[in-house]
Image (cartoon, rainbow, N blue to C red):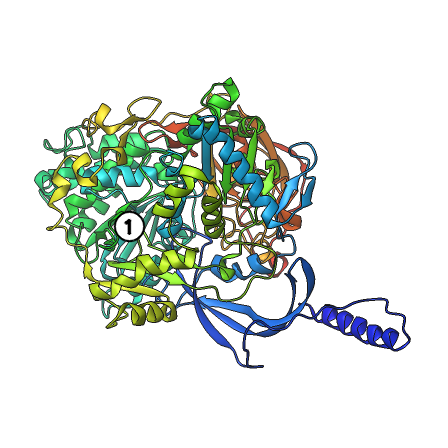
Amino acid sequence: MERRDFIKISAIAGATAALDSCGQPDVELIRFIPEEELTPGVATWKPSICTLCAAGCGTLVKVVEGDAEVMRHGRAGLIKMGLAKKIEGNPQHPISQGKLCPRGQAALQVTYHPDRIKGPLKRTGPRGSGQFQEISWDEAIQQLVSQLQALRCAEQELNLFFLTRPLRGQRRQLVERFLRLFSVRSPIYFDPFEDAVVRNANAYCFGYSQLPTYELANSAYVLSFGADFLGTWNSPVAQSVAYGVMRQGHAGRRAKFVQVEARMSLTGANADEWISVRPGTEGALALGLAHVMMREKLKRPQDAGRAGEFVAGWAQGLPDCTSEATEKRTGVAAPRIERIAREMAAHSPAVVIAGGAALAHTNGLTTAFAVSALNALLGSVGKPGGIFFSPQPKRPSHFVEFPAPAGSLMKIDDFIRPLLEGNADAAKVLMLFDANPVFATPPNLRVREALEKVPFIASFGSFMDETSILADLILPDHSPLESWLDDIPESGSTQAVVSLAPPVMRPLHNTRSMPDVLLEIARHLGGELSDKASERMPWENFEGMLKSEYQGFYKDGGTPAASSADEFWQKLQERGAWSGQGRYDPVAQAAAKAPLAKQRGEAREGFWWGTRRALPIEEASLAPPPMSFEEPRFDGDPAAFPFHFLPYESQAFGDGSLAHLPWLQEMPDPLATAMWSTWVEINPDTALKLNIKQGDLVEVASQHGMLQAPALVTPGIAPDVVAMPIGQGHTNYTRYASGRGANSISILAPMVVRETGSLAWAATRVKITKVGEGKLPLFGAELREHPHEHR
């Protein structure tokens, strides 16, 4: 609460008392009885989990007594309660290790945001008008139950869809159990900048359909293709901690780091050597490096094992990937290629990373296979300083499941196409959680048009955004700090990790936890559905589900140690994480040599995208044929659209879902120093040719749309590339993000990585035109002698 609001409320209280004494009450002030015991002035640090990216960092939240404006029993008033005031990294958590990124710090603002949806709403105006009316939770739940019962009665259960961001842990299990009541297999997991390409390559090469963990702390040489692993990619906090040890933690030795990319990222700015490469040719460079090592007998082809089998010509030493041929493809000089190859072979352990734009071209899977083979050739798989796969807990067995390799873009396309075509299998009821595909998909997919045709949409969103505004019913979720949380981090540790945290504070508003709402809905379905629910979802609430699934871990050893289930459950809540004692053992993973269907246990877990639509693995080949380097395809004629367009995930906003947080809007970009805005990054030579100066308003146009933003002239980008951060350009996303900047996704072509069905977001070509003068707010620009090389 702001100090001025407290003074105002105190004044109202005084005026009320004065009026009461005269028998003329004018204002009634409600002060609720505290719901917890608090010690004034004493702070308590409680464990929690950051949910603002997929890394799963453990946090500690500082909670102190304070006055809060709350909703209780349908009435607004004041109450003394424990309030979260500060978030830091949890030193006992294996992922964050006491550190935290800016997003994690800003997570506090989700709870106190003035534009949070404070209670259930039902639509009263035309769809998309934003006209809603507050209703009770009983009415909201009954309305959704009625829609689900109607599907059941009409034998249309398969017309129920659940669209969500990728989930892990028990939230994922609960959603999938709920959908199986209606014979729906799984939700649509939507992430526009997913890592399906990495998971697919790892599944075939190493037997793990998950993101890798890089033990950078012990690496002697690191080569990264496009992965901003210190800023936004994979598990940036864990990777930053390990990178610090790699650079400064070994007396007398400083590891070398080389970054290959077309636009300098935060990670690239930390490199010893930064190499600009032609977009989409990163895989060719990886194969060129491998060719040098095998030609000079620094490494043997058989050292790559299974991973090398997926690259055509590997056993013969890649005769088509000479340094001269690689130079023609990539633009990287042949002597440089040979020097780096020799350096990597001589400095063990060496490891290669690929992510971001390098895998966001139409040939992304080719690049991922090339990098996997190069890692195996270097002997870095499962070795200290190399690449690992975080072990998963042995109980319950379903913890090993990760998002399937199939890509989000194809899943969304398969969902919306029946709606646009009016097919009988189109969605009739859609449940929506924490996903905004209207904002985060290319315009040619026509997602908004399709969603407008869904008869009934229920959203669990906490904020009104471009997708949730189309809902008929909104059942707002608690904020993460008000919720029971759990997670099984996919990467970031060489040990198995389970995170768990109770709420650090009581709810401020009339919201309910999404898992608790699903459990309540299941109990109200009636008949056979309720019978199924009582068998498959027997818990009274989400806390009960977490306890039943996790308290048995005390038998498995690890940390914290306990002698009973109850003792372990208490210690787990206090510590915030359980970590197993075992490490990834590549020798024990002989299943990597078996067909993928046997590795995963169920054939449905694997997909090979050989055609436009996914084929279940039992209907397609279990593995792709050996791949040669494939030239990337781009949308747009180079004569009309001469520049490669590179949208990139910003450290502040991610895919745009965090643009509503003012702390992140105000945070200067670590390289550009821009705030509260978006911009177009242009090479100085390109800007000079186009007569574009710093801050000029430019128009960027593709075959699918155009946008305008101020120019940022920077040497850290290739002359034939223009780049933009992702996240701004919202039309409806709270007072802090709406109408601010431009949405770089809005001009993307719906190009895909053919084999995975994921969005090839680096495959669009554009043209750029100066429009006039603009304004680009830079932090402290007037204080710097040379903010940029070119003006």
What residue would you read off at disc 1?
399
Q: Amino acid at mark 1?
A: Phe
Q: Residue sitting at 40 percent across and 37 percent down?
A: 528
Q: Residue sitting at 20 percent across and 31 percent down?
A: 321
- Quadrant position of the N terminus in the picture: bottom right
Residue 180 in the image: state x and y as whole percent.
Answer: 37, 38
Q: Residue sitting at 58 percent across and 39 percent down?
A: 143
Neighbour class for label 1 at 10 Å: few (<14), some, many (≥20)?
some
Q: Is residue 725 visible from the viewing direction of this image? A: yes
Q: Residue sitting at 24 percent across and 49 percent down?
A: 397
Q: Nearer the viewer, residue 57 or 631?
A: 57
Secondary structure state at the residue bearing disc 1: helix
Q: Nearer the viewer, residue 727 or 763?
A: 727
User: How many discs appear?
Assistant: 1
- Quadrant position of the C terminus in the picture: top right
Residue 760 in the image: state x and y as whole percent.
Answer: 40, 32
Q: Nearer the viewer, residue 582 or 689?
A: 582
